[in-house]
Amino acid sequence: MKHTTRQAAQIGLLLITLLALALRLYRLDGQSFWADEMSSLVSAAKPVPRLLHDISNEIHPPGYHLTLKAWVGIFGIGEAGVRSLSVFFGLALVLLTYLIGRRISGEWAGLVAAFLAAISPFQVYYSQEARMHMPLA
């Protein structure tokens, strides 16, 4: 790939990532927690042994709850802080979509795929929920 084409693709990916970030951060704390999000937060507030015991009967893997516990220790328990973990996973999904698209069909296909993931209403919505939907995507 030519140097200028590669640079254009990198700039395109940067712009797509910034768009994805802006869409996911817009009104991130615009609504109060809903019941399932509060359940995740309550689980994350427990000591690790208690957390593992309580979620041992759940159908969801424990990784999200443990990650959320560490995340709220850094970013706090406000709506934006807790939901920002899903924003992180949503951005990672956009970048992963780019990499897969690039590998399968080339640079421009990867950029188009990443753009579609960045603006997908479903992806944006679930990137703003403090639940394990984005890591499982």
Image (cartoon, helix red, strand yellow):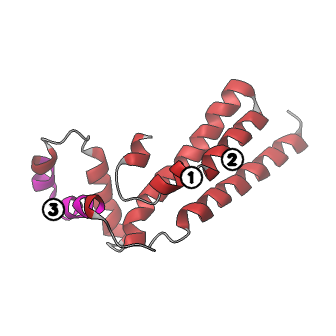
Q: Is residue 82 left or right of residue 35?
A: right
User: Which numbered marker is on residue 115?
Assistant: 2
Q: Is residue 91 left or right of residue 112?
A: left
What residue did someone put label 1 on? 121
Label 3 residue SS: loop
Question: Which one is in front in this view, the residue at disc 2 or the one at disc 3?
Answer: 2
Question: Marks 1/2: CA distance?
Answer: 12 Å
Q: Is 136 drawn above or below residue 119 in the view shown?
A: above
39 falls in the magenta region = yes
Give the residue displayed 36% in from the left and 59% down from the top: 130
Give the residue displayed 31% in from the left and 57% down from the top: 68
User: Which amino acid does the dot numbered 3 rest on?
Assistant: Lys
User: Which amino acid does the dot numbered 1 rest on?
Assistant: Pro
Q: Earlier in the sequence, mark 1 or mark 2?
A: 2
User: Which amino acid does the dot numbered 2 rest on?
Assistant: Phe
Question: Circle 1: is it few (<14), some (14-19), or many (20+) Cα within 10 Å?
Answer: few
Instruction: Specify start and end residues of the magenta stretch as a single range.
Output: 37-52
What residue did someone put label 3 on? 46
